[in-house]
Image (cartoon, rainbow, N blue to C red):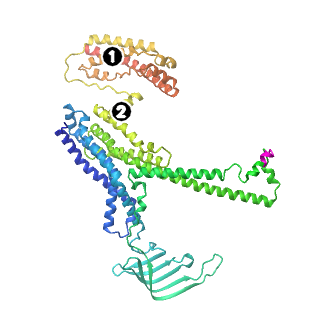
């Protein structure tokens, strides 16, 4: 029997409140980005509020599936970041509840969101996309609202250019009006200048009523010619002139059947049906084109009848020189042959180009329908993938609020968007297989989500900067420095009498080790990779050194504490083969660039180890002198 625990209700409630807020924020951001693309189609056209409301409503419906994954990622990051920051996640784990059990109720909730996203993709989205496309196409065809600026040419009225020096917004009067009319073409252009005028819209919003006062009209009487120096024209002076200009400023909805044929306006069943239909049509057209080309342009004996072919075979003519036939022809015949060949080649190229365009366009439409079919699934599943990325990341980062989670969410979503958009374009253009391009982003996110979930469940320090800094220092060879301080409470004082002898013995071992290993000389390249033993001698020296340092750190002498900090931190394995596995060392040695890198790195560490031995010996002598002063 399924029981819902109070902890599950608490987790879902914490996530749900954040999810609702982040969803509307993401939807608003995507809508502003979408609005910016069509701002030129909306501004200055006097659209009614009902049209604008439809535009925002349909655009919001189409953007819901895109907003859901980012909202899930951001909400899960903030939720688990808050749990970690308030130590609630630590308390849950201390009670024996693993991260997977904490994520379980939210995982079921996100699975429900996957279903909602798929419903919007497959049912609501196509309808909204068709309505939105029809609305945008209608807005593009609507004429702009008439608002003539001062001092510049206004060209929004078709076939007219108007310039007004000044206008009175209260009375609607225009002053110093200059009009270029190109209605009958540039060759019969009409230029009108008037002291004043007024422009009004007719009641049906289909025409403009232009009233002009005290002006001149100039009109060409015939087409202009480049050879003619004088062009006759007609000039007319008028005190009052009235003209009707065609200007449709009303909003008319276009036929919605146009957008209904787009791939984005179809559900999965219609997409599959269209794919099958276009595939059958493409195959039939392709076979017909192949038949036409093989039997027409590229048939083996083009221009020869069956009887001619039989005569050639009976005559046993296997080879003949075309150039010699061309050379003996007359000039007229040569020109006729060349002209015929060029004309035939151009016709063949034009015919093949048309056939190529037809087939490529059909294949492109098939790929667009296939990408849209896969897109409905991949975008829906991305909600679940983002949840398994955001929740573990929130548990690892342990930072709530809108700071770090927002930055991480934006970075992850940008990476996902780049990969997804690249795969989509590659699949649409036929450079990749369709399913490969559309599922690339999911194939990248899924392992990342599994890795982060595993690391967070094991409390691994994936994003701990110190761990990566220490690893980098280890690779480069940067080591830490000793920081020994005087202790406030000392239980056992050092045995200074014995320490002097131990330091002397340590110095002797360091001298013997340095002389035996010849550390300053370059190691043998081949023996380096064949060795399969650890350097136990340097390990023993390091253990003795650390034991002496630990005992002498109990001293009360500040001078001795300062001398202890001069001891180096020895790397006991950096000067030998890089790997503990024998065959891996052989492979590294065989691969020349890698082996050469490790060889010079080991050589540098051997030289540093030799200097460390000298430094230990010198520091032992200094500490022996300090101990003698302490004993006195």
The C terminus is located in which quarter? Answer: top left
Dividing the picture into quarters, in which one does residue 629 lie? top left
Name which residue lies at 37% across and 30% down.
Answer: 471
Q: Position of residue 65 (x, y in %)?
A: 33, 50
Q: How many discs appear?
A: 2
Q: Is residue 68 visible?
A: yes
Badge 2: few (under 14), some or many (20 or more) residues near its Cα, within 10 Å? few
Image height of 318 relative to 258, above or below: above
**Foreground: 30 or 257?**
257
Q: Which residue is mark 2?
A: 468
Left or right: 574 as drawn, with respect to 496: right
Looking at marks 1 and 2 on the same chain, the residue that comes earlier in the sequence is marked by 2
Name which residue lies at 63% across and 77% down.
Answer: 225
Q: Which residue is mark 1?
A: 543
Q: Position of residue 452 (x, y in %)?
A: 32, 36
Hey, which residue is sitting farthest right in the picture?
Answer: 328
Q: Position of residue 441 (x, y in %)?
A: 40, 43
SS category of the residue bearing label 2? helix
Magenta range is 311-317
Q: Is residue 632 visible?
A: no
Name which residue lies at 57% across and 50% down.
Answer: 287
Give the alpha-carbon distance from disc 1 to disc 2, as whole Å. 27 Å
**Foreground: 544 or 401?**
401
- The image's mark for residue 29 is none
Hey, which residue is sitting farthest left in the picture?
Answer: 6
């Amino acid at each position: 029997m399924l029981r819902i625990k109070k902890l599950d209700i608490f987790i879902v409630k914490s996530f749900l409140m954040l999810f609702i807020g982040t969803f509307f924020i993401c939807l608003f951001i995507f809508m502003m980005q979408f609005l910016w693309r069509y701002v030129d189609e909306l501004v200055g056209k006097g659209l009614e509020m009902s049209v604008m409301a439809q535009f925002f409503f349909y655009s919001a419906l189409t953007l819901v599936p895109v907003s859901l994954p980012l909202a899930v990622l951001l909400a899960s990051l903030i939720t688990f970041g808050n749990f970690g920051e308030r130590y609630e996640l630590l308390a849950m784990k201390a009670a024996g509840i693993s991260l997977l059990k904490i994520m379980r109720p939210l995982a079921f909730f996100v699975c429900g969101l996957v279903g909602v996203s798929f419903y919007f993709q497959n049912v609501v989205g196509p309808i909204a996309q068709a309505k939105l496309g029809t609305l945008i196409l209608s807005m593009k065809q609507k004429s702009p609202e008439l608002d003539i600026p001062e001092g510049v040419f206004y060209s929004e009225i078709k076939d007219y250019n108007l310039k007004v020096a000044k206008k009175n917004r209260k009375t609607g009067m225009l002053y110093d009006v200059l009009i270029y009319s190109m209605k009958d073409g540039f060759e019969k252009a009409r230029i009108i200048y008037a002291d004043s005028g007024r422009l009004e819209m007719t009641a049906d919003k289909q025409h403009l009523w232009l009233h002009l006062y005290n002006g001149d009209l100039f009109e060409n009487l015939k087409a202009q010619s480049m050879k003619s120096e004088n062009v006759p024209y007609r000039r007319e002076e008028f005190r009052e002139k009235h003209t009707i200009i065609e200007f449709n400023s009303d909003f008319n909805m276009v036929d919605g059947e146009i957008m209904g044929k787009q791939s984005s306006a179809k559900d999965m069943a219609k997409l599959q049906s269209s794919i099958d239909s276009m595939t059958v049509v493409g195959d039939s057209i392709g076979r017909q084109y192949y038949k036409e080309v093989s039997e027409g342009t590229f048939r083996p004996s083009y221009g020869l009848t069956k009887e001619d072919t039989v005569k050639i075979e009976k005559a046993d003519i296997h080879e003949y020189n075309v150039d010699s036939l061309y050379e003996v022809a007359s000039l007229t015949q040569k020109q006729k042959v060349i002209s015929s060949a060029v004309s035939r080649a151009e016709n063949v190229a034009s015919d093949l180009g048309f056939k190529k365009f037809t087939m490529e366009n059909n294949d492109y439409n098939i790929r667009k329908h296939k990408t849209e079919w896969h897109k409905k699934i991949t975008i829906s599943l991305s909600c679940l993938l983002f949840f398994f990325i955001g929740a573990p990341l929130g548990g690892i980062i342990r930072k709530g609020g809108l700071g770090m989670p927002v930055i991480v969410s934006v970075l992850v979503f940008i990476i996902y968007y780049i990969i997804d958009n690249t795969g989509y374009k590659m699949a649409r253009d036929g450079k990749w297989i369709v399913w490969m391009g559309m599922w690339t982003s999911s194939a990248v996110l899924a392992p990342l989500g599994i890795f982060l979930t595993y690391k967070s469940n094991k409390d691994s320090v994936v994003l701990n900067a110190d761990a990566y800094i220490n690893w980098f220092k280890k690779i480069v060879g940067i080591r830490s420095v000793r920081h020994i301080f005087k202790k406030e409470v000392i239980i056992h004082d050092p045995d200074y009498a014995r320490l002097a002898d131990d330091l002397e013995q340590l110095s002797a071992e360091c001298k013997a080790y340095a002389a035996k290993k010849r550390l300053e000389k370059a190691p043998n390249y081949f023996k380096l990779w064949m060795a399969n033993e650890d350097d136990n001698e340097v390990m023993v020296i390091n253990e003795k050194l650390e034991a002496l340092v630990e005992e002498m750190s109990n001293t009360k002498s500040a001078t001795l504490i300062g001398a202890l900090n001069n001891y180096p931190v020895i790397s006991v394995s950096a000067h030998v083969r890089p790997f503990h596995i024998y065959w891996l060392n052989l492979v590294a040695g065989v691969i020349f660039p890698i082996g050469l890198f490790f060889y010079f790195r080991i050589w540098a560490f051997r030289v540093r180890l030799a200097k460390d031995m000298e430094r230990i010996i010198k520091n032992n002598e200094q500490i022996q002198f300090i101990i003698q002063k302490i004993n006195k």
